[in-house]
Image: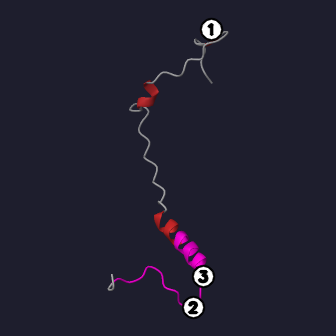
């Protein structure tokens, strides 16, 4: 470990242990933050598997009649 460089180095001032801990937490959180993923390109409507799935059923008064009406 004697040959390794420190992760942080205080150049000026005399920070307290709490200040160093806060700085270390901020630097660690910033380095661990993920970059947002690029959205996947949309597949064609013909190849969309979700289109073949049935919509949820909502039983109740008038549900049978409403099942034949277009949903909008």
Label 3 SS = loop
Which residue is under mark 2?
Answer: 12
Residue 15 percent location from the top left of the image = 59, 84
Residue that sits furthest to the front in the current view = 17
Q: Sequence-wise, which precedes: disc 1 or disc 3?
A: 3
Residue at image position (41%, 39%) is 43
Residue 49 percent location from the top left of the image = 41, 30
Residue that sits furthest to the right in the current view = 61
Q: In this orientation, which residue lies closer to the viewer: 52 or 60? A: 60
Q: Is residue 68 above or below residue 49?
A: above
Label 2 SS = loop
Which residue is under mark 3?
Answer: 16
Residue at image position (45%, 53%) is 38
Residue 1 percent location from the top left of the image = 33, 81
Magenta stretch, residue numbers: 4-26
Task: Examine the structure image and report whether residue 14 is included in the region drawn in magenta.
Answer: yes
Q: Is the C-beta separation of discs 2 and 3 under 8 Å?
A: no
Q: Sequence-wise, which precedes: disc 2 or disc 1?
A: 2
Labels 2, 1: front one: 2
Q: Quadrant of residue 56?
A: top right
Q: Which quadrant is home to the C terminus?
A: top right
> CA gap, disc 2 to disc 3?
13 Å
Residue 32 percent location from the top left of the image = 46, 64
Q: Left or right: 68 with respect to 32?
A: right
Residue at image position (62%, 11%) is 63
Q: Is residue 68 above or below residue 8?
A: above
Label of residue 15 in the image: none
Mark 1 neighbour class, 10 Å CA radius: few under 14, some 14 to 19, many 20 or more: few
Which residue is under mark 1?
Answer: 65
Q: Is residue 28 above or below residue 54?
A: below
> CA gap, disc 2 to disc 1?
77 Å
Mark 3 neighbour class, 10 Å CA radius: few under 14, some 14 to 19, many 20 or more: few
């Amino acid at each position: 470990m004697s040959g390794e460089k420190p992760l942080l180095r205080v150049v000026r001032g005399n920070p307290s242990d709490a200040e160093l801990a806060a700085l270390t937490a901020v630097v660690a959180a910033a380095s661990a933050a993920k970059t947002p993923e690029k959205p996947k390109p949309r597949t064609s409507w013909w190849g969309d598997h979700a289109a073949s799935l049935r919509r949820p059923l909502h039983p109740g008064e008038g549900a049978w009649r409403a099942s034949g009406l277009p949903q909008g």
